[in-house]
């Protein structure tokens, strides 16, 4: 199917395709919702699609899905976040990044979360974990969805001529463009995967078992232990290993100079 | 985080296998943190009490 065929299909079924793409993103599946939103905006400028109808359909579908994630966060706590973050391309920083955003901006973070890759899926359960009220969550959710979808469709609407030119050129390139995009996406995902695998392999080599650490502590060996858990994780499990110091990500940079280089440093999360 | 520490020149970094969950599951000692220390801005666990 050529890009112009896809656009025609999108124009005809925008109230089905757009919500489906948004739900896929909400479930952590990286499908291109933004290009589709831009295209629908451009189509609306040429009277081939209805923006209010498309936005209404997106809200009508996105709200129940995010309410489900929110309830899961409320009932199951931080475990839901960890499971969800495994689906993202940045599983190691996902919880911490989202939690920092929430701690800094509170429920208002929901207004921008959909613009940040990976956070769209994680923010609703996090709001549940933090005990945001249902009505407040629903209001911010609707506002966040409208802001996000409205921004991209609005951009498409304003730059409809430029998007039309881009689509014509893409059509001329035909399958070569599709292949190029697919290769670029695959290369990006592969790069992230390889980088993480190499990092985890390095960490595996240096890991210490709990038995080994306990032995070191019992024999009086001087070991520095850092508790690197997020505030949310500490609230869920308010315990520390004896002698451990809690350090947040933000404070770590300033505290690095206090750490002696001649001692073993044991770090742990949840 | 471990990578960040290594980049800052701290080479003897050892992530704990299984984290705190595994440590607790093995029945090794832990300290309970008082409520004031479970917030976002932590202080050293000086007021903690040993529970295991």
Image (tube, rainbow, N blue to C red):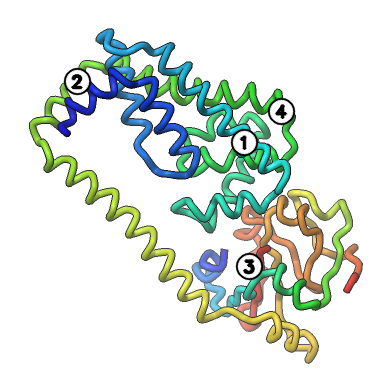
Q: Chain of mark 4?
A: A
Q: What percent of the width, then of the height, locates residue A157?
A: 32, 15
Q: Which of the numbered marks, if any, corresponds to residue A134? A: 4
Front residue of B43 and B19: B19
Residue where numbered disc 2 is placed: A164
Question: Looking at the image, is mark 4 or mark 3 nearer the viewer?
Answer: 4
Q: Chain of mark 3?
A: A
Q: Chain of mark 2?
A: A
Alpha carbon distance from label 4 to label 1? 11 Å
Q: What percent of the width, then of the height, locates residue A219?
A: 78, 91
Q: Which of the numbered marks, if any, corresponds to residue A257? A: 3
The answer to which of marks 4 and 2 sits earlier in the sequence is 4
Alpha carbon distance from label 1 to label 2? 37 Å
Query: Do callouts 4 and 2 mark residues in contact (Cβ within 8 Å)?
Result: no
Q: Quadrant of residue B17?
A: bottom right
Q: What percent of the width, then of the height, locates residue B13?
A: 59, 76
Question: Looking at the image, is mark 3 or mark 1 nearer the viewer?
Answer: 1
Q: Quadrant of residue A41?
A: top left
Q: Secondary structure at mark 2?
A: helix
* Residues behind callouts 4 and 1 on a single chain: yes
The answer to which of marks 4 and 1 sits earlier in the sequence is 1
Q: Which of the numbered marks, if any, corresponds to residue A68? A: 1
């Amino acid at each position: 199917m050529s890009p112009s065929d896809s656009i025609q299909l999108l124009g005809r079924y925008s109230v089905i395709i757009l919500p489906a793409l948004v739900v896929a993103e909400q479930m952590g599946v990286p499908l291109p919702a933004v290009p589709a939103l831009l295209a629908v905006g451009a189509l609306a400028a040429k009277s081939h699609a209805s923006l209010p109808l498309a936005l209404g359909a997106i809200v009508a579908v996105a709200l129940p899905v995010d309410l489900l994630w929110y309830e899961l966060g409320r009932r199951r706590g931080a475990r839901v976040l960890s499971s969800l973050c495994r689906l993202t391309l940045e599983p190691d920083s996902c919880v911490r990044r989202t939690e920092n955003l929430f701690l800094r901006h509170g429920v208002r973070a929901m207004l921008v979360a959909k613009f940040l890759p990976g956070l769209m899926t994680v923010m609703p359960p996090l709001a549940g974990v933090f005990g945001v009220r249902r009505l407040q969550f629903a209001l911010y959710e609707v506002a966040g969805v409208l802001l996000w979808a409205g921004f991209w469709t609005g951009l498409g609407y304003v730059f409809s001529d430029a998007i039309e030119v881009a689509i014509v050129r893409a059509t001329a390139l035909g399958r070569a463009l599709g292949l190029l995009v697919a290769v670029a996406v695959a290369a990006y995902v592969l790069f992230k995967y390889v980088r993480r695998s190499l990092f985890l392999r390095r960490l595996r080599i240096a890991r210490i078992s709990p038995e080994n650490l306990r032995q070191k502590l019992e024999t009086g060996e001087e070991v520095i232990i850092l508790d690197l858990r997020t505030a949310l994780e500490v609230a869920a499990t308010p315990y520390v290993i004896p002698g451990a110091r809690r350090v947040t990500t933000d404070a770590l940079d300033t505290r690095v100079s206090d750490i002696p280089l001649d001692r073993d440093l044991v770090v742990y999360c949840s | 985080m471990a990578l960040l520490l290594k980049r800052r020149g701290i080479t003897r970094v050892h992530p704990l296998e299984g984290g705190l969950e595994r440590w607790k599951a093995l029945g090794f000692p832990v300290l309970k943190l008082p409520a004031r220390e479970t917030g976002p801005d932590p202080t050293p666990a000086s007021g903690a009490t040993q529970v295991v």
